[in-house]
Each structure stands twice: as structure tokens, then as C-alpha cells.
Image (cartoon, rainbow, N blue to C red):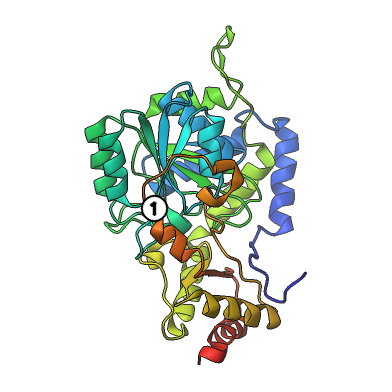
């Protein structure tokens, strides 16, 4: 089904710019394996978040697998990594690919962010916890980030942060998403605010970890010795890196426009509906709204579809409801995750979104509720 107003509409660089880049890549005869475009793009990502080393990847899922292995060591199923059940399946899947077991926790109701107190209870009561994968839901920086860092430091555990949708977001204390914990992971998939098609990056202040990640994504080759660990191929090629470099040039403008769309949605929200706390300091991957109840959400979605607007429901089913993760150990209560799955609705946010399109979304949302 095609929609007048699709869920995503990434703005990619104009062809003329890319022709120039493509010619430069051909002239350099360097297509992948840490070429000049990739090196410049990685430096640009690190500089954007500020004073961090960035290691680019083919996508965020491979980056997560690499980070889990490089930060936690070889996997062992008896060792657990704490992760929220209300997230995209890539995080828990990466935990399993890295050889560990996901240990699922709930989110808190205001920002739909992982629940720090549940994580603390698990860290204190189980000796099997190997690390924490903190998911910044919808790319919103966790309000309690300092508390998560303290918990991890006290327990001697790495704090790995899945900020896939959050390149360009800020934490509540003003620091950039990408600068906290042991390392953070971004996705540059077409659905994300910083879109190149497929791509990702890890940002970290730990240079040794960055070196390990670069070896991991290149078959874990060590100089002259061949593979000295289990690696894979996760490198970002020159053409997507060139697109990323062009996107960086105008990302400030893109962020502003996305936040403007969000504010118009906020102004038009029907009574009883709300936005997750902190979304205004995010890069607004999409605009997730919470309906007062399931019936209102479902009716609104039908009205949106009828009006030619593509809305989606993230993240439902929650991780613990998906067959692959049905046996994953979990916190005694996932009550918030269970509740919000019935009420979330994600609205399209485009960088270039005419006022009339925004109005159409707002009107369809309000519909019978108005
Ligand atoms: C999009 C997303 C991913 C996966 O990113 P890819 O680049 O598509 O592999 C992982 N985690 C979260 C939270 C995401 O939103």
C-alpha cells in the first residue's frame, strides 16, 4: 500500500554532489577498507558528538554485536546482559549473537526509558550479569543517565548504549547522546533522523576499545598473524560514507526542521494524548504519541490510513512477546511495557514536511476525539 504521506521520507544529497563524490572514489581507486571518505566520515561523526572516537559500521546491528564482544569478551550463555523489553529486536538479537543471554527489564511510564531501579535490583541480586545494554528509546537520551553510569561503575560493568535512533539528540543535562557510558551505538538506516540507507557507528572515549572494534569489523585480523579472534566483515564502504559526509554538512538544519514538526504535532494533540518525556531534545526519529487507551489508538490509526497517512506501531510486540525471546529471563514485572504496547502510535516526521501535511496528520489524529 502506498500513502500520500509515507512514514519516512529521507532527504538524500542531490545527484550532482554524489556524482562528484563518485568520480573522486573512482579516481582514488579505493572503495572500502578505511578509505578516505570513510576516514573523514568517522572523524566527522566523532567531532559532531564531541571529542569521541567513532568507528563506522555497515549497520547498527553489526556494530552492537561487535561492541558487545569487544567490551564484554567472548560470549557465554550463562552470562546475562540487561536490556529493556520495549525496544527494537536488534539489541536483544545482538546480545544473543555475541553469545550472551538478554535479561529483560521494564521501562518507566513517563519517557518510556529503561527502568533504572529494576536494573539495580537485578545487578544486586544476580552474579550472572555481565553488562548493561541501555536502549535510548526512540533516540531520547535517558533522563537518569548519570544514575546508570554510577550503577555500572559501582558494579564494575560496562555500560553500552543503544542510541540507534538518536544521532543529534541530547541528554537532559545538555550533553550529547554519543558521549556517555562505555560507548554508544548509532544507526544511519533510512528510517533514522541521520539517514544514509544502511550504516552505523560506535562512539567511545576508549581508544583501545575503538582499535578492537576496527579489528573486529575486519575479520579480527591482527598484523601478520591473521585472525586472532572471531571477527566478521562490518566495514562501511566509500559510497555510503560519501553520502554520510554530505548529510553531516546540513544536519543542523535537518534537526531544526524535525523539531519544528514535533512542536506542531504537540500543539495539535487531542486531549488525553501525550508525548514521551524528553522527546523535544531528541533528533525526532518519528513522533511517538501515547493514546489514552487502545481503542482510541486503533481508531486514530484507521483515520490516519484513510487520510493517506502512514503511521506505525513501535515497538510492538515487545521483545518478551516475540518467539525468539520467549524464554529470556526477565524482571518480575514488565507492566509498563505490557500497557504501552496497546497505546503507542508513531507518526511520520519528514525533514521537508509541508504545513498542509502536518495539518492532515493532526486532523486525522483528532478526528472523533475532537
Ligand atoms: C534501528 C535500530 C537498530 C538497528 O539499526 P540497523 O542500522 O538497522 O541495524 C537497533 N536498535 C534500535 C533501538 C533501533 O531503533
Q: Position of residue 200 (x, y in %)?
A: 56, 43
Q: Quadrant of residue 295?
A: bottom right
Report which residue position mark 1 lands on: 106
Task: For residue 56, say whether it is visible.
Answer: no
Residue 67 lies, in percent from the top left, at: 47, 32
Quadrant assignment, res 13: bottom right
Question: Percent position (x, y) of residue 166?
Answer: 46, 54
Q: Nearer the viewer, residue 103 or 178?
A: 103
Packing grade of label 1 (10 A; few <14, some 14-19, many >=20) is many
Q: Secondary structure at mark 1?
A: loop
Q: Residue at x 27, y 43 (%)?
A: 120
Q: Position of residue 251 (x, y in %)?
A: 51, 58
Q: Is residue 117 visible?
A: yes
Q: Residue furthest top?
A: 225
Q: Is residue 52 above or below residue 284?
A: above
Relative to 72, residue 238 above or below: below
* Residue depicted at x 47% and y 58%: 138
Q: 167 or 339, which is in the foreground? A: 339
Residue at the spot 51% in from the left edge and 70% down from the top edge? 257
Q: As drawn, is 134 to the left or to the right of 318?
A: left
Q: Residue at x 58, y 80 (%)?
A: 300
Against 65, is 188 above or below?
Answer: below
Question: Seen in the image, is 179 located left or right of residue 220?
Answer: left
Amino acid at each position: 500500500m502506498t500513502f500520500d504521506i509515507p512514514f519516512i521520507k529521507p532527504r538524500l544529497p542531490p545527484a550532482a554532489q554524489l556524482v562528484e563524490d563518485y568520480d573522486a572514489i573512482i579516481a582514488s581507486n579505493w572503495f572500502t577498507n578505511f578509505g578516505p571518505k570513510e576516514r573523514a566520515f568517522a572523524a566527522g561523526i566523532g567531532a559532531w558528538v564531541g571529542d569521541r572516537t567513532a568507528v563506522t559500521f555497515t549497520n547498527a546491528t553489526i556494530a552492537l554485536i561487535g561492541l558487545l564482544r569487544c567490551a564484554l569478551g567472548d560470549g557465554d550463555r550463562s552470562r546475562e546482559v540487561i536490556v529493556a523489553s520495549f525496544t527494537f529486536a536488534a539489541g536483544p538479537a545482538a546480545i544473543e549473537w555475541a553469545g550472551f543471554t538478554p535479561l529483560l527489564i521494564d521501562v518507566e511510564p513517563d519517557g518510556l526509558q529503561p527502568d533504572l531501579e529494576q536494573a539495580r535490583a537485578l545487578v544486586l541480586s544476580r552474579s550472572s550479569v555481565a553488562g548493561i545494554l541501555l536502549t535510548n528509546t526512540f533516540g531520547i537520551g535517558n533522563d537518569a543517565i548519570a544514575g546508570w553510569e554510577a550503577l555500572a561503575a559501582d558494579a564494575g560493568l560496562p555500560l553500552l548504549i543503544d542510541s540507534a535512533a538518536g544521532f543529534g539528540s541530547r541528554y537532559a543535562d545538555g550533553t550529547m547522546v554519543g558521549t556517555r557510558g562505555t560507548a554508544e551505538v548509532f544507526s544511519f538506516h533510512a528510517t533514522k533522523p541521520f539517514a544514509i540507507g544502511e550504516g552505523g557507528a560506535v562512539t567511545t572515549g576508549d581508544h583501545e576499545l575503538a582499535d578492537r572494534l576496527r579489528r573486529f569489523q575486519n575479520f579480527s585480523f591482527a598484523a601478520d598473524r591473521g585472525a586472532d579472534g572471531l571477527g566478521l566483515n562490518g566495514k562501511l564502504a566509500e559510497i555510503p560514507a560519501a553520502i554520510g559526509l554530505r548529510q553531516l554538512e546540513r544536519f543542523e538544519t535537518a534537526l531544526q526542521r524535525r523539531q519544528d514538526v514535533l512542536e506542531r504535532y504537540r500543539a495539535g494533540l487531542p486531549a488525553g494524548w501525550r508525548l514521551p518525556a524528553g522527546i523535544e531534545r531528541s533528533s525526532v526519529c518519528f513522533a511517538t504519541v501515547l493514546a489514552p487507551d487502545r481503542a482510541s489508538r486503533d481508531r486514530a490509526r484507521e483515520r490516519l490510513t484513510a487520510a493517506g497517512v502512514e503511521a506505525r506501531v513501535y515497538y510492538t510486540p515487545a521483545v518478551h512477546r516475540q518467539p525468539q525471546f520467549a524464554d529470556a529471563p526477565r524482571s518480575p514485572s514488565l507492566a509498563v511495557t505490557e500497557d504501552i504496547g496497546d497505546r503507542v502510535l508513531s507518526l511520520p516526521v519528514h525533514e521537508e514536511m509541508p504545513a498542509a501535511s502536518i495539518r492532515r496528520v493532526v486532523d486525522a489524529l483528532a478526528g472523533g476525539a475532537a
